[in-house]
Amino acid sequence: MLLLLLGALSLWGASRLVWFAEFRDEGVRGVVRYTENGAQQATALVPLALLALAGVAGVIATGGWIRRVLGALLVLAGIAGIWSGVTRLSFESAPGLPGTEILLGHGLAVLGGILVALGGLAAIKWAGTARRLGARYSAPGAKRARRDPDTELWEALSGGTDPTDPTGQPGTDRPTSGG
């Protein structure tokens, strides 16, 4: 789950950094620096981060085959995060443009995608063994149906035991008074 949280944080952080920058001639304003952040260039980053956060809750709350399906979905989300980080990556940078920040944004997206994919693989691997939410409140075995106390008394009598005898031994006779 820590992998998913770190992956979500990385994807969100990548969406806030500059991913594209260039100088544009704006006519009267002159040449200005135009930038776009990761959320503008790769619109899937924020939804993938939110999916990873929801995946944390899903992994905690579920178990078994549902957790495996969720893990597979998280692996696909991680691959999408990696893909978002490697597409549109350019190593060319003009002087005065934030080339390091652009590379850092793409690198954070790739790192976030890897972490989310690893978190999904961990969810798949430990789907059957990891505890799920509310598991400690479940009975370890099958629940026994409650029986009627009167029926239990009659069955004990039919079996040859006296249900009122504190020792619970069959065939012990008690002395009766007045006899």
Image (cartoon, rainbow, N blue to C red):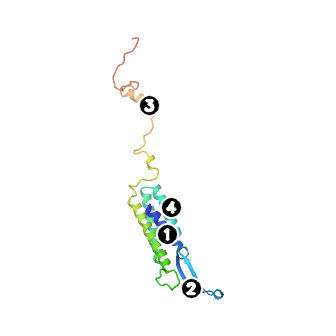
The picture places residue 61, in percent across and down from the top left corner, at 47, 55
Q: Residues within 10 Å of mark 3 (few under 14, many from 20)?
A: few
- Whether tag 2 and tag 1 are in contact, CB under 8 A, the answer is no
The picture places residue 168, in percent across and down from the top left corner, at 36, 27
Please tell me which of labels 3 and 2 falls first in the chain.
2
Q: Secondary structure at mark 4?
A: helix
Which residue appears at 45% of the width and 37% of the height? 146
Q: Nearer the viewer, residue 18 or 64?
A: 18
Query: Where is mark 3, residue-wise?
Result: 151
Query: Where is mark 4, residue-wise?
Result: 54
Please tell me which of labels 3 and 4 falls first in the chain.
4
Query: How much space separates mark 3 and mark 4, taking CA atoms?
Result: 50 Å
Please tell me which of labels 2 and 1 falls first in the chain.
1
Q: Nearer the viewer, residue 125 or 34?
A: 34
Please tell me which of labels 2 and 4 falls first in the chain.
2
Query: Where is mark 2, residue-wise?
Result: 23
Image quadrant assignment for residue 147: top left
Query: How much space separates mark 1 and mark 4, taking CA atoms?
Result: 14 Å
Q: Which mark is residue 27?
A: none
What amino acid is found at the position of numbered circle 2 in the picture? Phe
Query: Where is mark 1, residue-wise?
Result: 11
- Quadrant location of the N terminus in the rendered image: bottom left
Q: Secondary structure at mark 3?
A: helix
Q: Which of the two discs, 1 and 3, sits closer to the camera?
A: 1
